[in-house]
Amino acid sequence: MLQINKRNNKLLTRFQADYGIGNKFMYENRVIQTNKLFARCLFIKIDVEKKSD
């Protein structure tokens, strides 16, 4: 679990850099935020794969 969260934090940092998202993520629970973001990315990916069939 810790390993996943470390990787998600890198993902979040990259996401913040790309989209200029500031304190919205910083002052909330980072792990919950990153897991939501990660889940959203997965769902979008699955959605795209389903549509391409």
Image: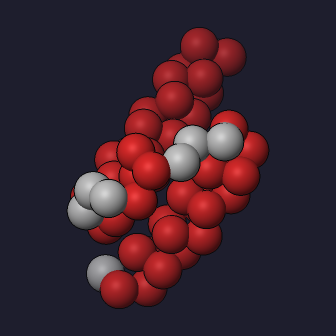
Q: Identify which residue, 40 or 30, lies in the foreground.
A: 30
Q: Is residue 21 left or right of residue 31?
A: right
Numbered label tally: 0
Query: Which x, y percent locates residue 44?
Result: 51, 29
Q: Is residue 16 above or below residue 46?
A: below
Q: Is residue 40 above or below residue 7?
A: above
Check the image and name the residue furthest to the right: 18
Q: Is residue 42 above or below residue 14?
A: above
Residue 10 visible? yes
Q: Identify which residue, 26 or 1, lies in the foreground.
A: 26
- Which residue does the image show at 51% across and 23% down from the upper left? 47
Quadrant hosting residue 2: bottom left
Query: Which x, y percent locates residue 22?
Result: 53, 48
Query: Which x, y percent locates residue 34?
Result: 40, 57
Quadrant hosting residue 12: bottom right
Query: Which x, y percent locates residue 33?
Result: 33, 53
